[in-house]
Image (cartoon, rainbow, N blue to C red):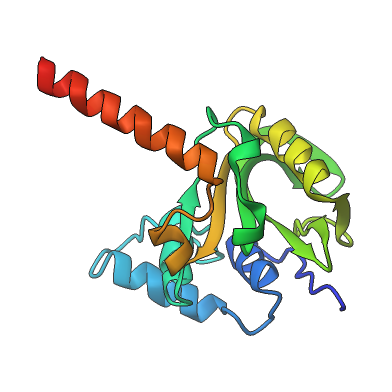
Amino acid sequence: MPIYHEKQKWELCALHALNNVFQDSQAFSKPQLDELCQSLSPGSVLNPHKSMLGLGNYDVNVIMAALQNKECDAVWWDKRRNLQQLQLDSIIGVIMNMPSPIQLGFVSVPIRRKHWITIRQIDNIYYNLDSKLNKPQTIGDTEAVRKYLQTQLKVKGCELLLVVEKEVADNRKWLREEGAQVEERMSELQDSASAAS
């Protein structure tokens, strides 16, 4: 199966990440994301969900709204969790928000901006589909992707969103059963502690 890999244009990394996760150039367009920005902040002169220049730079609210239009959801991954608890078979892909240096031609400026990238499994192999890469970067199997994600999560400012179908989000199927049981028990203990105080 050929890998769809959208390349970086303007500040449209969120658009590229969404199209890369769905492996479809027609999944979303800039006008669609601009319309979502407008619906999130109707009547605002300067929309807080995108660049003032109108070149993109969409925030997490736009990504979440876009995914909901596809009957999907974004689940924020708590960095304190062990990645072994992640049920990889239940997710469509991962969208990460990473600090990224600004490039002016061949010069890298020491200012960092947020950049959206996609990690996706295709034919049992995980790939980094970062729109700034010339071509998809092979990560490997499930253990390799867990190690890769663990390394990325150590980077200050890195955030990870699981892209899952709505039903998977609602039933927490993105979490392995033992992880869900531990989480449920912790919640019960917190409820008991709250009731006692």
- Measuring 60% from the left and 80% from the top, which residue is drawn there? 27
* Image coordinates for residue 104, horizontal then vertical, percent: 77, 47
Q: Is residue 51 visible?
A: no
Closer to us: 33 or 53: 33
- Measuring 40% from the left and 77% from the top, which residue is drawn there? 35
Residue 20 placement: quadrant? bottom right
* Image coordinates for residue 18, horizontal then vertical, percent: 60, 67
Residue 45 placement: quadrant? bottom left
Which quadrant of the figure contains the C terminus?
A: top left
Q: Residue reaching furthest top?
A: 197
Residue 57 placement: quadrant? bottom right
* Image coordinates for residue 117, horizontal then vertical, percent: 68, 54
Closer to us: 119 or 189: 189
Closer to us: 111 or 134: 134
Q: Residue reaching furthest bottom?
A: 26
Left or right: where 191 falls relative to 76? left
Left or right: where 44 falls relative to 32? left
- Measuring 79% from the left and 74% from the top, which residue is drawn there? 4
Number of numbered labels in the structure image: 0
Closer to us: 62 or 30: 62
Q: Is residue 139 visible?
A: yes
Left or right: where 10 falls relative to 103? left
- Measuring 83% from the left and 43% from the top, which residue is drawn there? 144
Q: Is residue 178 above or below residue 24?
A: above
Which quadrant of the figure contains the N terminus?
A: bottom right
Left or right: where 169 falls relative to 152? left
* Image coordinates for residue 64, horizontal then vertical, percent: 44, 61
